[in-house]
Structure formats: structure tokens, C-alpha cells
Image (spheres, rainbow, N blue to C red):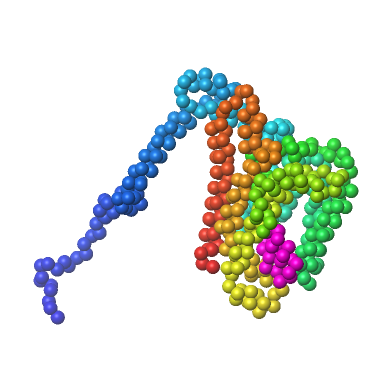
Amino acid sequence: MTDTSNTAFVRTETIPPSPPPAAETGAIKWLRENLFATVPNGVLTIIAGYVIFLALSSVIPWIWNGVWNASSLSECREILDGTRGACFAVLTERWPQLVFGLAYPSDEYWRPTLAFFLLFFAAAPVMFFDLPRKMLIITLFYPFIAYWLIWGGTIFVPILAFAGFAAGYLVYRQLVTNSFAAGFLGGVVVAFIVWWIAGFLVPDGASDNAMLSPVASRDLGGFMLNMMLGVTCVSLSVPIGIALALGRQSSMPFIKWVCVVFIEFIRGVPLITLLFVASVMLAYFFPPESTVDLFLRVVIMITMFSAAYIAEVIRGGLAALPKGQYEAADSLGLDYAQAMRLIILPQALKISIPGIVNIAVGLFKDTTLVSVISMFDILGFIRGPLSSTTAWNGIYWEVLGFAALLFFVTCYGISQYSQWLERRLATDHR
């Protein structure tokens, strides 16, 4: 072995670590790797930055010079005195109408506000798995409590509606051990029978002296109407979409073709056409003496529309599962309902999360289409009663920007929750 102890060019101690070069750390590294990695990337970054600068140089002074206290657009212009600025005073003055609609009683605003905050407590145990399961009791009763708070009237209506669901569920539990189809159809039939009988139990004028004064559906409006339609239709369309997806894969020809015809027909019709059907034609399918609420008819049509699309998304999730999952369920001796509930559907729904969320976000934005059938949601109120007033005639950017901000916050929140759910369930490692 060569002796190197006296060799001058062999270092005997460890060199202390040196800081990285300035170009390889911090903001300079990030800019070089992400914005100026190549010459084309650098050119595109400069062009994009210039476009953003032009947009912000116009928008920021317009917002900064905004007027928040005025009674009309002409008064805003007098205050601005030629200076370019927004007239946000329309938001401060018309805030209740933008949120609650034009005709909802102002002294009853606390009722939809309370229903809105209770929505978070009702949705939390469904959206977050770590919360106590006992909180599902709030989720179970929330739809009926929210209905009573928003519409008011006699409390027997939500109680009897809950009785119909409870009776249907009890019949389903009794029959599902023999046949899933018998349990499902039996539960639906019994629920409708209970609701039909309940129609005779509530006398006319029962809401006249109710604890909460009744509010007609035609008085609902503003962003509250968009939230009610979005939450109600998404909540209803998911279980209906699951049932349609399972029915489309059923081995029973009648069930399969009914689901196929329903899905393909609804997907082939634009939503705005279904809304016109709900407004004009759907009433002809009910008994002549019945007066079906327009809100209920719109909910039926939007739910049918979104359920057809969700069914196709879930069918894709079911088709993505390997055949071995179905064989594993059979080898364990599980019946159809147990296999679907415990093995198949959890995996299929996990795969289908991005598609379901995409449809939910699109559906929430499509609720603005109800303005074409004279339901004054936030866009309908802006384009109708607000624009027709002499005080605010001609103002668009401020109110439409406010509506866009509300929809952005809601849809972005839904999108962020779906991304968190995908990370939590590790959908990329299925």
C-alpha cells in the first residue's frame, strides 16, 4: 500500500459546507426554473406579465376610487366628479335583495340565515370522516328543519315528509334481505303512499296561525335561491345517480332498459329545455286539482338532469373496477346489496370523485338558468328588477362582478374540498 501521509495535495480534514451559488437558491432559482427556463418561456412570461399589468393598472384604480355610500348612480358620478371609479353603493343599498331576493319578508331574513349556518353542521359529518358519527343525526333532520325555516307554515308538513322517508326505509330494511330490487321499489312505493295519505291529514289553512309565517316559493330569490337549488339538487342527484348506474348494469332487462332510456333521453335534452318543461308542461302530468310548486318542479327537472350525468360518471367508476372485486364479493357469500355497499360502491365512488365534483360545480352555475323562467335568482334580479330602476339603470360591472365573486368562492371551495378528499383517499393508489 502507498504511504500518502506526507503528500501535500491530499487533504486530511473535511472541507466545511459552503452556501450554494446565488443562482441556485431562493427566488432567483425559482424564477429561472419556472418562468425563464428557456427563451420561449421567458418571452411568454414577459408577455403575460405585460397583459396582467395592463389589466391591473385599469382595475385597481377603478376599485380603489369606488364609492360605497350613495343613493343612485347619478349621485355616484357626482361624487366621483369625472374620476374613474366604481359605484359599489349599489351593493350596500341592494345587499338584502341580492342575497334574499326582492319579495322575501325583511323581518324574516334570520330564517334563511340560520338555515345557511346549520348547513355547515349538517354537511360536516358527511364531508369529514373524523367527526363523531352521532353528528349524522343533524344531517338526517337538517332538510326538514331547513324547509320549515325557509318556507315556514305548519310544522306538520316537514314532520309528515320525514314520516314518509322513515316508513320507506323501514320497508326497505325488511325486504332487502330477500331482494334488493324488492326492497328499493317497496320502500319508494310505501313512501309515496304515506305522503299521499299525509295530504289529507293537513287541513286547509293550517299555516295561517303557524309559529313561522308562511313564505311562498315565488318570494324566494337572490343568491339564496341559487344556494337552495344547488344544495338540494346535488344532494338528491347523487343517490339517484347511483341507483341509475346500478340499474343500467342490472341483469334484469326491464330495469336496465328503463335506466338506459332515462339516462340517454335526459342527456340528449338541454337543461334550459327541461326548465321550460318544468315551468309550462310539467303541471299537466299532475292531477288537475293539485297545484305543484314551481320550485319543486324546477328541483325535479334539475335533479333528473344532473342524476343522468352522475349515473354515467359512476358507471365509469364501476367499469374501472377489476372483475376480481366482484368475484371476491361473491366468494365471501355477500348478497347484492352487501357487495355493493361494502366492496363495489366505495371503490367506484372513490374513482368517480373528480367527475362528480365537476358535475356538481357545473350544476351550481347552471342554477342561474332559472332566470329564464322568471325566477329571480341573483342574475335574474340584476337583469330584471335592479336594472329597471331609474336609480341604478346602467350599472352592470359592479353587480355582475359581485355575483361572479360569490360563485367563484363557492365553486372554488367545492373544488378545494374535492382535492383534499382525493388526497385523503389516495385515489391515485387504487
Q: Residue at x 16, y 66 (%)?
A: 11
Classify the position of the N terminus by image quarter: bottom left
Which residue is painted at 78% across and 56% down in the image? 165
In this figure, what is the number of numbered marks?
Answer: 0
Q: Is residue 24 magenta?
A: no
Vertically, is 105 above or below 290?
above
Q: Looking at the image, which residue is at 77% across and 70% down?
A: 179
- 19 displayed left or right of 358: left
Q: Is residue 304 above or below residue 146?
A: below
Image quarter in which the C terminus is found: bottom right
Q: Is residue 350 visible?
A: no
- The quadrant holding residue 117 is top right
Magenta-drawn stretch, dominant element (helix, strand or loop): helix
**Residue located 71% across and 50% down the image:** 301
Percent x, y of residue 101: 68, 35
Residue 251 part of the magenta segment = yes
Q: Position of residue 421 (x, y in %)?
A: 56, 58
- For residue 166, which quarter of the picture? bottom right
The residue lying toward the viewer, choosing from 79 and 271, is 271
Query: Visible in this render: residue 220?
Result: yes
Q: Position of residue 333 (x, y in %)?
A: 69, 78
**394 relative to 320, above or below:** above
Residue 18, quarter of the rendered image: bottom left
Give, as a single range, the part of the protein colored magenta: 241-263
